[in-house]
Image (spheres, rainbow, N blue to C red):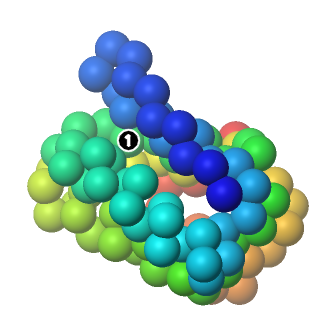
């Protein structure tokens, strides 16, 4: 699992790649700190290179969503593949998140 955070014109983009399983989600939780600290801004999660996400990873996304909602920011998830699309559909994440391709 890998998270790269870029800033462009006030928008923070977190680029996720690899597999977010239970072990990787602990590391991701630490690496997401800058996004949580900037939850009052526009945040985009680019998942083009994300191959897998476990329930632990989904929980981290929910944590970020709640923080963004509380702080008045916005969160967009982009470029999910078919496998992650299935997970998001089964878990109801499509109703919770602004998901774009």
View extreme (top): residue: 9
Q: Which residue is mark 1?
A: 43
Q: Secondary structure at mark 1?
A: strand
Q: Residue at x 31, y 37 (%)?
A: 42
Q: Is residue 61 visible?
A: no
Is the residue 10 above or below the residue 25 in the image?
above
Instruction: Please state the horizontal and vertical placement of residue 55, each as a whole percent of the image.
Output: 60, 85
**Which of 73/18 is in front?**
18
Position above or below: 19 against 38: below
The N terminus lies in quadrant: bottom right
Residue name at image x 75 percent, y 55 percent: 18
- Please state, as top left, top right, bottom left or bottom right, where the C terminus lies in the image: top right
- Residue 6 in percent (x, y) is at 45, 27
Can you give x and y, in whole percent of width and height, for residue 62 in the image?
41, 73
Q: Residue at x 41, y 66 (%)?
A: 29
Question: Who's the residue at 45% across and 35% down the image?
Answer: 5
Q: Mark 1: few, some, or many residues within 10 Å (few <14, many ≥20)?
A: many
- Please state the horizontal and vertical placement of residue 98, each as a whole percent of the image: 49, 54
């Amino acid at each position: 699992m890998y998270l790269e955070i870029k800033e462009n014109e006030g928008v923070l983009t977190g680029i996720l790649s690899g597999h977010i399983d239970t072990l990787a989600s602990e590391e991701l939780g630490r690496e997401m700190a800058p996004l949580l600290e900037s939850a009052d801004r526009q945040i985009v999660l680019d998942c083009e290179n994300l191959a897998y996400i476990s329930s632990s990873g989904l929980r981290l996304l929910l944590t970020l969503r709640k923080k963004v909602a509380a702080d008045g920011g916005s969160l967009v998830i982009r470029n999910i593949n078919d496998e992650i699309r299935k997970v998001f559909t089964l878990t109801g994440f499509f109703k919770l998140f602004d998901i774009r391709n």
